Amino acid sequence: MLIDSYERVVDYLRVSVTERCNFRCQYCMPEKPFSWVPKENLLSFEELFEFIKIAIDEGVKKIRITGGEPLLREDLDKFIKMIYDYQPSIDLAMTTNAFLLKGTAQRLKNAGLKRINVSIDTLKPEIAQAIAGKDVLKNVLEGVEEALKVGLSVKVNMVPMKGMNANEIVDVLEYCKQRNMSIRFIEYMENVHAKANISGMKSHELLEILREKYEFTDEGFDGASPSHSYRMKDGYKFGIIEPYEDDFCKKCNRIRLTAEGYLIPCLYFDEAMSIAECIKRGDIKGAALVLKEVVRTKPEKNRWGGEDAAVSSRAFYETGG
Ligand code: SAM
Ligand code: SF4
């Protein structure tokens, strides 16, 4: 079992399979110019899988494939099947912008994928274009319908921003509710790669808007999930991810692996250690030691909130959120 210096059990690995993306979301990516990590620096699926096996053997129970946009990487279904075949009981999920989901959802499900989280920030085509930098909404919504049709469980992530999509909080929630998908509103996390002058919404502002329309009760945190849960009278649950709050890091159970092989102990900080060399030379023990060291050095909490609050220099498109 992997336990950090603050007695938190680390059993969740997020694997970013590429930093590349077909969107340029304002809150995530710089506009341009932009230079990608050369393709030859990426670990192959076989190499990522070698590390994943080590992580599972050390106690990881949940794996999320993310990116950049994971569906840009060819043969993703084969990679998913490798993980599923090694440990069918693993909680195997993916976060995607859904643009390429139509036509691939069935293959992903057949490979062993159980759940997906899809980013839907708006239901208005022109706002989607403004946020993502291109006309994306039709493909995204069709991708979601197909995922539901093939039986994948779907959760939606929305990052509400003032002057952009803040007036659609209820509409996006209703869209999800009608399809029995839960929604998590994510507070915009300040980072140096995002477009300047984004004004994110804090949890209390979201709750104020939602209270005008709904009655709901506060259910606290859902296990180790960073999402603060609320339940409506009819049983529907929604969540808010509040990285600026003190409690956010208390139950953190996750570490992140980038497509280049860097293991990252915390989404906020720049610190990382590479497992690439160990994996490439077949040094399983060495990679396991790096994993344990990264878990040991996991910081107590991020610095988005509190007295010494600061903007993060970590790129979400590299770490996978
Ligand atoms: N491309 C996929 C997607 O967009 O779902 C997966 C990668 S993306 C980095 C993962 C999640 O991070 C998305 O839900 C996105 O909304 C969220 N995200 C990215 N930048 C963020 C920021 N600055 N603050 C809050 N959430 C952010
Ligand atoms: Fe791409 Fe996801 Fe970042 Fe948007 S949030 S730019 S879809 S990686």
Image (tube, grey):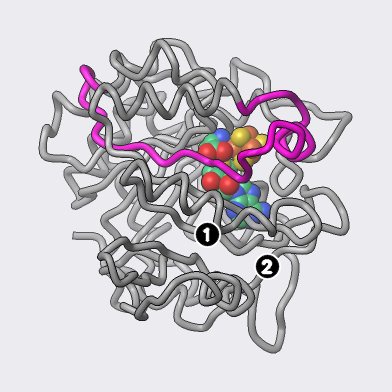
- Tell me if I can see residue 190 in this picture: yes
Q: Is residue 257 left or right of residue 206?
A: left
Residue at the (45%, 66%) spot, across then down = 297
Residue 123 sits inside the magenta stretch: yes
**Of the residues shown, which amino acid type is indicated by label 2?**
Met
Circle 1 residues within 10 Å: few <14, some 14–19, many ≥20: many
Q: Is residue 83 left or right of residue 171?
A: left
Picture coordinates of residue 317, whole percent (x, y): 62, 40
Picture coordinates of residue 164, whole percent (x, y): 77, 52
**Of the residues shown, which amino acid type is indicated by label 1?**
Phe
Cα separation, mark 2 vs mark 1, equals: 9 Å
Indicate whether 82 appears above or below 304: above
Does the beta carbon at disc 1 come under 8 Å from ligand 1? no
Residue 30 sits inside the magenta stretch: no
Query: What's the mark number on residue 185?
Result: 1
Element type at mark 2? loop
Magenta residues, as a range? Answer: 109-137
Query: What's the mark number on residue 135?
Result: none
In the image shown, does 147 or 48 lie closer to the viewer? Answer: 147
**If you read the primary sequence from the N terminus, does the residue marked by circle 2 or circle 1 appear first?**
1
In the image shown, does 47 or 77 lie closer to the viewer? Answer: 77
Element type at mark 1? strand
Residue at the (36%, 52%) spot, across then down = 182
Query: What's the mark number on residue 201?
Result: 2
Picture coordinates of residue 129, whole percent (x, y): 75, 31
Which quadrant of the structure image shows residue 23? top right
Disc 2 to disc 1: CB gap under 8 Å: yes
Check the image and name the residue furthest to the bottom: 307
Q: Is residue 217 left or right of residue 159?
A: left
Indicate whether 201 appears above or below 7: above
Picture coordinates of residue 96, whole percent (x, y): 48, 33
